[in-house]
Image: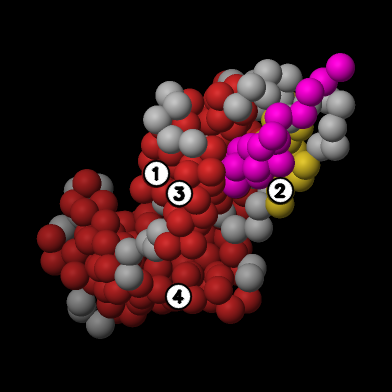
Amino acid sequence: MFQLTPNYELAVECCLLAGRLMMESGAETYRAEDTMDRMAQSQKLTESQSFVTPTGIIFSGNKALPTRLARINNRTTDLGKIALVNGVSRKLANAEISLEDAYIELKKIDEEHKMYPFWIQIIAASIASGAFLILFGAKLVDIPTAMVAGGIGYAIADKLELRTKVKFFAEFFAALVISMIATFSVAYGFGNEVDKIIIGSVMPLVPGLLITNAVRDLMAGHFVSGLSKGAEAFLTASAIGAGVAIILSL
């Protein structure tokens, strides 16, 4: 008969919290499942099972006990948070910290870890837009316009998503504004190549990590997660393309 470990509930809660933090931060599905399994094994939950998708986690510490579910509402890219959760997982698996300490560290990561300030994110998006323009072989005179358009587009996408909770509408409107800035800048002599300015400026919105994770999950046999992430990336790309196409067709 299965013997319930003294910290069974805390172990399950700890595994679910680690998995949720990783998926909310943009980790691959297999990585989240592997982390949860390693943490469960370290707590003698040898029959644990986890099923992770981009929108939810199902976890069972033992088939004789109820299965737990954790919903994933927000998804972003935060590699720093993934590294922190991985660090806690390794320390728990190596018996360097107790289960209680691991749970406290994960709660701190969840509550205290913040992304860079918004103004730094805008500057980074602007620099990335200008750098991509150089990569595409555009003229140097177009770089300032691309940096301005890329920064404004990123800010619009972020703020609109927070207000409307509709990611694809925010990306569509941001691409629309970027295309307008690029078109007007060329029309009034502040730029030369509208196509390269637009391409460089929308790059901070392109779901590169999402596409990579979708391919990685499909190759690993996680078809539900791979197709879900692929569909999300396709909708994002469609929203960006639609915003650009509307302005260029006028």
Which residue position is annotated with label 1? 84
Residue 105, label in figure: 3
Name which of mark 1 and mark 4 comes first in the sequence.
Answer: 1
Distance in Å between CA atoms under marks 1 and 3: 9 Å
Q: Secondary structure at mark 2?
A: strand
User: Closer to the N terminus: mark 2 or mark 3?
Assistant: 2
Which residue position holds label 2? 70
User: Considering the numbered disc 3 on the image, is that residue within a helix, a strand or a loop?
Assistant: helix
Badge 1: few (under 14), some or many (20 or more) residues near its Cα, within 10 Å? some
Quadrant into which the N terminus falls: top right
Residue stretch in magenta: 1-19
Of residues 38 and 183, the one nearer the viewer is 38
Q: Amino acid at mark 2?
A: Ala
Name which residue lies at 22% across and 46% down. Answer: 135
Residue 115 position, x and y percent, is 38, 62
2 or 3: mark nearer the eye: 3
SS at mark 1?
A: helix
Query: Decide: marks 1, 4 in contact (CB < 8 A)?
Result: no
CA gap between label 1 and label 4 equals 29 Å
